[in-house]
Structures are given as structure tokens and as C-alpha cells.
Image: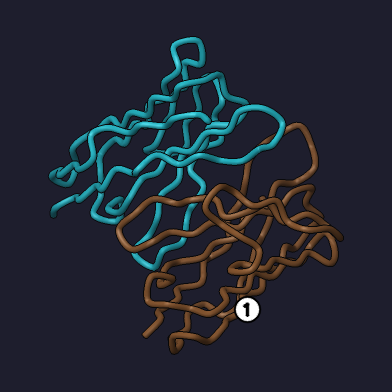
Chain colours: A cyan, B brown
Amino acid sequence: GIQVEQSPPDLILQEGANSTLRCNFSDSVNNLQWFHQNPWGQLINLFYIPSGTKQNGRLSATTVATERYSLLYISSSQTTDSGVYFCAAATGANSKLTFGKGITLSVRP
Amino acid sequence: SAVISQKPSRDICQRGTSLTIQCQVDSQVTMMFWYRQQPGQSLTLIATANQGSEATYESGFVIDKFPISRPNLTFSTLTVSNMSPEDSSIYLCSGLRAGPSSEQFFGPGTRLTVL
């Protein structure tokens, strides 16, 4: 099956800093999603982005499908951005998502 | 986006017992899935819940341990049977709506602790 790798595993930022989170995947995808897991365990959909670039406020994401990677950009980070960020990908018609191990982000005031 | 609810939100259970988790979606979805997230780990797919037929399980998960039902397009249940402390996890259901997008939406999760 598809392999999904995220880097770095941990990230510590000062409030106001910018960051880039990376997701590499091993096969062509028809689904690539970024999630933020809050402290209560809920997965928040950030982006559905199998290709191209999207922006939502301080967050943006780019997927270069031909090179099999996706980037999540966080600008002007806030303490509420802390948590675990997951990238997940699916290939083929079965739509089964494979998750990366996640990136733990800590934003300090 | 689809709204997905799960019940219960959390539970503490004794080993050897079973717990049934319910998942309700507010609109019709083509596919529903169940995932497990063990403490400090990522999410792993347990099975695809098929309407009116047996679920399709991933490697390492079996029907006797995790029986799943999906009687209609918007509702599914996952039972964790004969629980042990190793079953302590967050269990999440997800749905995929009909249409050109393959975006999945997740429920809030059920946090299970087995003593």
C-alpha cells in the first residue's frame, strides 16, 4: 500500500513565527488531506488537496502530485495552532486513507 | 461538509466486556470507515463499513473482535468485543459523500479506556 511520511516529527515555534510541514507519499493519489487534531482528539479538516494550492486564512497548502509531496504552511502562528498535524492519502477507488505519523507542533507565547 | 456524530464520546470499561459505538452522518454517504488511534500513535484503518453486508476488514483486524454493522446509508456501529487494556484507544468513524470529491470527514471520536 501507499506510504506516507511526515517531517519534521516535532516542531517548536515562538508565537508569530512561520512554519512549513512536509508530507511525502509513495504513489499517485486521488485524495490528500491535512488534518489538525485538537487536544480532545477530534480531527479537524484543514485541506483536501490532491493537487494544486489552496489557502484558508493563515494556512495554505500545496501538493505537487508529480513529485509526490505536499506542504502545509502556517503563518503568524498562534498558541491555538498547537497540536498534531496529520497528512493522509488515498490511491485508487477504495478511498481508504493512509495516515502519516503526524507532526506535533507546539507554539509558545 | 458532512456532520458526523458518535456515541458515546468516552467510556471506561472492564476487561472482558464489550462496547458498541454508534456513528451517525447527517447526509447520505457512499462509504463509511472505522479507524483506531492508539495512545500517542497515528490513525489505522480498521474496516470499511458496507451497507447491508459484511464489513471489509484490514489486515490485523477480524470480525469476531470488531463486528461492524451498517443498516443504512447514514448509520454504522462498531463493537469492541472481549476488551483488554490493549484496546484502549480513540475510535473514529469517517464518511465519504457522493460526488466528485474524495474528501473524508471524521466524527469526534470515542475515547475508550479498558481497565
Q: Pointer 1: what residue? A: B20
Q: Chain of mark 1?
A: B
Quarter-wise, where is residue A96 in the image? Answer: top right
Image height of B7 relative to B42, above or below: below
The local crowd at label 1, few if under 14, some if 14 to 19, many if 20 or more residues have their Cα within 10 Å, is some
Local SS, label 1: strand
Most foreground residue, B87 or A72 = B87
Q: x and y percent of residue A16 in the render?
A: 19, 42
Where, quadrant-wise, is the C terminus of chain B in this rendering? bottom left
Q: Is residue B61 above or below residue A5?
A: below
Residue situated furthest bottom in the rendering:
B14
Q: Position of residue B69 (x, y in %)?
A: 75, 67
Q: Which residue is painted at 20% across and 50% down in the image?
A: A106
Residue in the foreground of this view, choosing between A76 and A102: A102
Image point 72% across, 63% down: which residue?
B25
Q: Where does residue B32 sit, x and y in percent of width and height?
A: 70, 54
Quadrant of the image occupied by residue B74:
bottom right
User: Residue A108, position in %: x, y?
Assistant: 14, 52
Q: Is residue B63 left or right of residue A26?
A: right
